[in-house]
Image: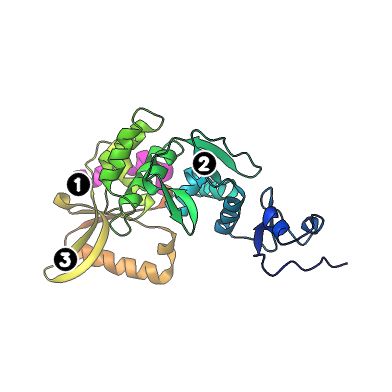
Amino acid sequence: MRPAPLPSQLPVAFTVSEAFVHGVAPQRLRAKDLSSPFHGTRSREALTDAERVRLLFDAVPAHAFICGTTAAAVWRLPLPGVIEADAWAAPRIGVPQHETRVRRAGMVGHRLAIDDGDIRFVNGVAVLSPARTWIDVSRAVTPPRLLALTDALISRRRPLVSLAELTDLHERFRGGRGSRARERSLELADERAESPRESMLRLILIDAGLPAPECNVEIWNGPRFVARVDMLYRDLGLIIEYDGDHHRDPDQWSRDQIRRAELESLGYRYTTVTRRDFDDPVALVRRIRRLIAAA
């Protein structure tokens, strides 16, 4: 026997309390055509990650907000794949420190010290501000990943916050967990970095005692633009490029070779770094050192 149709006023995903307001009987909400993404919610269709979090937000107290790694995912900050997947699968929901932590299956509740300005709204959902999210996430990721996240926050292409704002917030939370990693990230942050791997590579070189390279530098031959390179030791004429998986496309590879030949014809030395180089950073640093010595 087919379940009775639901009221047209109900969206695809809704809370049980919404259903009761529209006169839906409890037994109808137990029918197999409905899933229960979280306790007290129902859905007629599979939901995206963002839709699941939006539904959860409808079911938690009005003073709750998205926090931690889930807030970072909402702001589209670069998280490791495993952490991002977990952030969506088990959303982090915060409440002010004086409130009772939200406890519900399928999510993680937190009580946080927040001030005015620490909460923003994204599509009607309360989310920790990008800067306050940075404080939270600094306790959950490695220093290289935190530098990548810091670079992304102040990126000249899509800045979400200024370095000064991050510095002010760091002072507010100085001494807590993640404080040392945040301080180092503030020292090394570069608004010109354009990918997490570039940021992580820069930190590997600096930690090895090498000078920090310039990021995303335009190379010109007189009035003619030649290329924009990921990293450059200008005085040495040494270019370091990080090649992600998209560089394996045959057309992209051909363009890369032409670009490299053009740069080398202008006297630049050129080396490529790939994802596998991060498996052995010691060997990577040795290679860069040899290139620097030769230059």
Mark 3 belongs to which amino acid?
Trp
Q: CA distance from mark 2 to mark 1?
A: 54 Å
Q: CA distance from mark 3 to mark 1?
A: 24 Å
Asked whether 99 falls inside the magenta stretch, the response is no
Asked whether 279 falls inside the magenta stretch, the response is yes
* Foreground: disc 3 or disc 2: 2
The reply, left or right, for residue 149 in relation to residue 37 is left
When the figure is inspected, residue 85 is found, relative to residue 31, above or below; the finding is above
**x, y percentage for residue 228?**
25, 62
Label 1 secondary element: helix
Instruction: Name the disc covering residue 294, or none.
Output: 1
Q: CA distance from mark 3 to mark 2?
A: 50 Å
Task: Say if mark 3 contacts mark 2, CB within 8 Å.
Answer: no
**x, y percentage for residue 201?**
34, 46
The reply, left or right, for residue 114 in relation to residue 268 is right
Q: Which residue is disc 2 drawn over?
A: 94
Q: Quadrant of residue 103?
A: top right
Label 3 secondary element: strand
Which range of residues does the magenta coloring cover? 277-295
The residue drawn where x is 33% and y is 70% is 255
**x, y percentage for residue 162?**
28, 49
Q: Which residue is disc 3 drawn over?
A: 220
Q: Quadrant of residue 279?
A: top left
**Which quadrant of the figure contains the N terminus?**
bottom right
